[in-house]
Amino acid sequence: MTFTTKKTDQNGIELTIELGKEDLGHYIKETEQALGKSLEVPGFRKGKVPNDVIKKQLGDSKILEAALQTAMQRSLARVIQEQGLDVLEASDLKIKDNSAERLIYTVALRLFPAVTMPPLETIKVQRRPVTVETKEIDQTLETLKASRAILTDKDGAAEQGDRVEVDFEVSEDGKLIDGGSSKNHPVVIGNKNFIPGFEEELIGLRKGEHKDFSLTAPRDFANKEIAGKKLDFKVTIQEVKKVTMPELTDDFARSIGKFDNIDQLILNLKDGLAEEKKDKERQRLRLEIINKIIEGSRCDAPAVMITEQLDSMIENFDQDLHRHDMELGLYLSKLGKTQDDLRKEWQKEAERHVKMALILHAVAREREISVEPEEVTQALEALVQSTMIREGGQNLDFDMERMRASIRSRLLNERTLEFLERTCAV
C-alpha cells in the first residue's frame, strides 16, 4: 500500500491511497472467510465451508464488492492511524482505478484545527458550596399543596388567594398586542404571575362582571416589546373559586408518593433540591473552566464549522417554535427580521460553541480520554429500547450510525468534562 497527500486548504487534505495486487488478494481472502462464517450450506458445518463453495454460493461479484468496501475502510483507517491525522470528517470518496491489479481511490479529509492550550493544571476555578434553605423547601411544599388544592365555586367577590377564570384583551393605543387576548384564563390572585397590578384589579369583582383599566408595564419587564408601555385591559370574570389548601399531614405525604409521614416527604424534597443545585453548580463550574481555557488558548474556529453550528441553532430554534405552534418565518416577520439577521446576531455565540467543542476534543486527544465501543453499544441499545417503548412498539426508522456517533460524542464529552472538573476545580 502506498499513499500521497495534497493540502486543499488550511484544514483540508486530499488523500490518495493505492493498493496493489497482493493487498487486494489479502482483502478478498479475508472477505471470503468473513462471509463464509455466516453462510449455511447443506453438508457443511457453519463456519467450515470451503472457499470454492463460498464463491459458488455467493458469486464473485458479491465477494469483490464486499472486499472493495473492506479494503477502502481498512486502508483508510490504517493511514489515518499511522500518520496521526486528527480527522473531523471524511467525504468525497472517488475510485480512480479498480482492477485485478490495483485499486486507487481518493478521499477528502477535513482535519481538526490545531489548538494551543495553557497547561490545564494552571487553570483553577473555585467551587461554590451547595446548600438548601428552609424557605426553598417551604416554597416547594406550597407548590405541592397547590397541586392538591380543593376548588369550590364562590358566589361572592374575588379575594386574595381565590382562583378566577377571566376573558381578557390587552391593547396599546387601541391596537391589540401580540398574544394579548385569552378566554377562560386561570389566575390565582396573589401569585403575581401577571404584569404588576393586574391581579389586584380583579379583587372585588364577581362572576360575570366586567372591568376596564390601564397599567404601565415595568421598564425591566420580561416581554421587551411592551416594557415601559401603557396598556389598556378589558377583563370579564367567568368564574370565581375559593382555594382550600391541604394540611401538611402524614396523609398528605402519602398522597404524594411512597412516604410514611411528612418528615420523609420533606427530607426527599430537600435531597431533590440539593441534587438540582449540585447539577447547576456542576454546569456553572464546567462552563467557567472551559471559558478560562478558551481565554488562554490559540484556537481558530473554521468558518465551515461555525456555519454548521449556526445551521443547527436555527434548526433547533425552529423546532422549539413548532412545539409552541409557531412558524419561524412568521415569527421573524413580526420582528422585522430575516434568517440572515438572526445568523448575524448569533455569530459570536456559534463561534464560542465551536471553540468549546474544539477545546473538548483537544483535551480528550491530549489526555487520551476515550470511550469503549461496548459502552456506546450499550447506551445505543438502551436508547432504541426506550424510544420503542415510548412510541408504543412501532417499527421506527432508526439511523443507527448517526445515533451511534452522537452517543459516542456525548459520552466522550461527559468524560472529558469530568476530567476537567477533577483537574481544575478547587
Image (cartoon, rainbow, N blue to C red):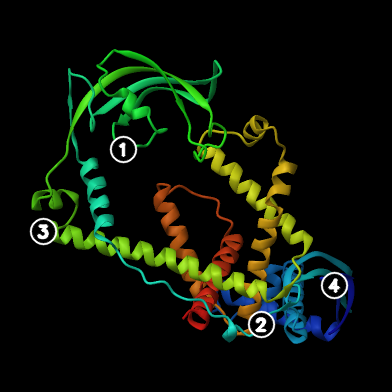
The local secondary structure at tag 1 comes to loop
Percent of width and height locating residue 266: 19, 59
Looking at the image, is mark 1 or mark 2 nearer the viewer? 1
Q: Residues within 10 Å of mark 2 (few under 14, many from 20)?
A: some
Q: Residue at x 56, y 39 (%)?
A: 321
Label 2 amino acid? Pro
Q: Earlier in the sequence, mark 3 or mark 2?
A: 2
Looking at the image, is mark 1 or mark 4 nearer the viewer? 1
Asked if residue 204 is positioned above or below residue 287 in the image, the reply reads above
Label 3 amino acid? Asp
Percent of width and height locating residue 182: 42, 23
Q: Quadrant of residue 242?
A: top left
Q: Residue at x 40, y 47 (%)?
A: 392
Q: Earlier in the sequence, mark 1 or mark 4?
A: 4
Percent of width and height locating residue 83: 78, 85
Mark number, residue 118 = 2
Mark number, residue 260 = 3
Q: Residues within 10 Å of mark 1 (few under 14, many from 20)?
A: few
Q: Which residue is mark 1?
A: 191
Residue 41 visible within the image: no
Q: Earlier in the sequence, mark 4 or mark 3?
A: 4
Mark number, residue 13 = 4
Asked if residue 93 is positioned above or below residue 136 in the image, the reply reads below
Between the C-alphas of marks 2 and 4, the distance is: 28 Å
**Mark 3–mark 2 CB contact (< 8 Å):** no
Between the C-alphas of marks 1 and 4, the distance is: 61 Å
Looking at the image, is mark 4 or mark 3 nearer the viewer? 3
Q: Nearer the viewer, residue 96 or 46?
A: 96
